[in-house]
Image: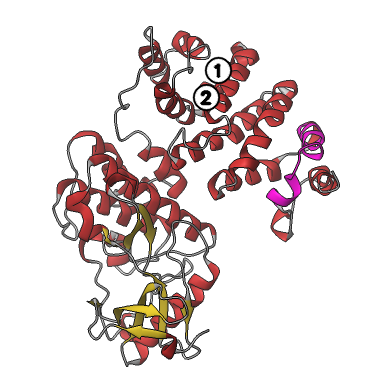
Amino acid sequence: MGQKRDYRLEPCPRATGTHAEVYGANRVSDGRFVAFKQSHPFEEARRRLKREIELLRYLRHPHVIELLDWDDKFEWSVMPFAQGSLEDLRPALSAAGIKRAIEQAARGLAFGHDEGFVHREVTPRCIFSMRGEGDERHWVVAKWGRARKPGPPLSLGTMTVPFDTGGFESPEVRAGRRPSRKSDVYSLGRVAAWAVTGTWPVSGIPLIPPGPWRVFVRETTESEPEDRPQDMRAVLRLLRRVEPESDCVLPDGTLETLKRASEGDPLALLDSTSASVSHPGDFPAYARFVSRMEDEQIRFLIRESPEKLAALARNALAILGGDWSRLPHELADDLLCWFPRAAACAVDLRQIPLLVDLCTEWFPVEIAWNRWEPLRCSRAFLRSLQGEAAMAVSVVLAMTDRASSYWRPSESWSGADERILQALVDSSKR
């Protein structure tokens, strides 16, 4: 915790909200320009800032705003200075840039949900660009002061200042019902609808854009929570289908093969395993194809030919090849998250040799990549293993360099097979 004198504030606030003002400020120690958030002088505003500070001390994720400093009375906080909100920057974004903003916001919200918190204030004004230009901006979710664990809504009698969520608030929250993760799903769907159409949503009135976003917005903004995607992971899967494939240079009809395979053509799916990925221009299209495969398609390949599934996996790893500039980071994350799904399908079908081959080749690449989303996916897979599968994978883990420091077994691994845990311990001795 710091002191206010550690910062030189601009004379006027950059932004003023219902609960706080935000100033540009220079940190005295190093001159860094930061955002200094000062609470308004009433109790509800201070409670809200305190809640946000306590939450952000705990939530550390690339797509959640970073907390840099705060005072012991919870009257102010310091965060990195943003380039602007999604509301500010939308006119400069292409369709790809809008999708990137929605995707990265979904990843930040997914992390918050994993930690047990519902944001409850998802609007274009809480999604900020921290760096980058154009479509390569890095987006984070901010304004966590209203976030809570799922449960009964706050009594309206305790609110002295209304929350400004407008047409982005879900029907159940607007009606005073219990908020949930699906409330954030609805709000993010409304943000996407606004970003695509340029129309500010009105409470209770559907806003469904035409074109490739239609299905995404329709499904995320269903009026009943049980009809929406179950969580942000499902939202991210749905989001992958929004845009048509980008231009690429796949030769000899391979792109058409991948398209037919993704649409469920079984013969094309088998042919896809021998698709050429030798040209860098092919990498994004092939990575998208693999990462978007449904589990049933993976099982079909395993049943028909485990060798073809193994070939597909080798092609996918060859795309990464230790050169992380070959793919956008989020696409590389998605590609690596395909491997736990493929391995789980191999477990379901009792294909233990295939399981061992996948883990042997995939584990070192993921450890070298070292990003949160693949780690979350692979950790869940490892914790799920039992019986013969756990025994087989434990042998691979014990022989994998840096496995222990990467997966870091702790109390969060409660229920994991003892052989998996012991293998991680053994790997630390290599």
Marks 2/1 in contact by CB < 8 Å: the verdict is yes
Callout 2 crowding tier (Cα within 10 Å): few <14, some 14–19, many ≥20: few
- The residue that mark 1 highlights is 300
Q: CA distance from mark 2 to mark 1?
A: 6 Å
Query: Is 379 left or right of 374, judged from the image as shown?
Result: right
Q: How is the image coloured?
A: secondary structure
Residue 346 at x, y = what percent?
66, 26
- Segment colored magenta: 389-407
Give above or below for 396 relative to 267: below
Question: Which of the 4 image quarters holds residue 302?
Answer: top right
Closest to the observer, 101 or 297 = 101
Residue at 27% over, 82% down: 10
State the quadrant of the C terminus.
Answer: top right
For residue 14, side relative to residue 383 (left or right): left
Residue 84, how many percent across, how many down? 27, 62
Q: Is residue 206 visible?
A: no
Q: Which residue is mark 2?
A: 296
**Residue at position x 56%, y 47% from top?**
371
Is residue 305 on the magenta stretch?
Answer: no
The amino acid sitting under disc 1 is: Phe
Q: Residue at x 53, y 84 (%)?
A: 1
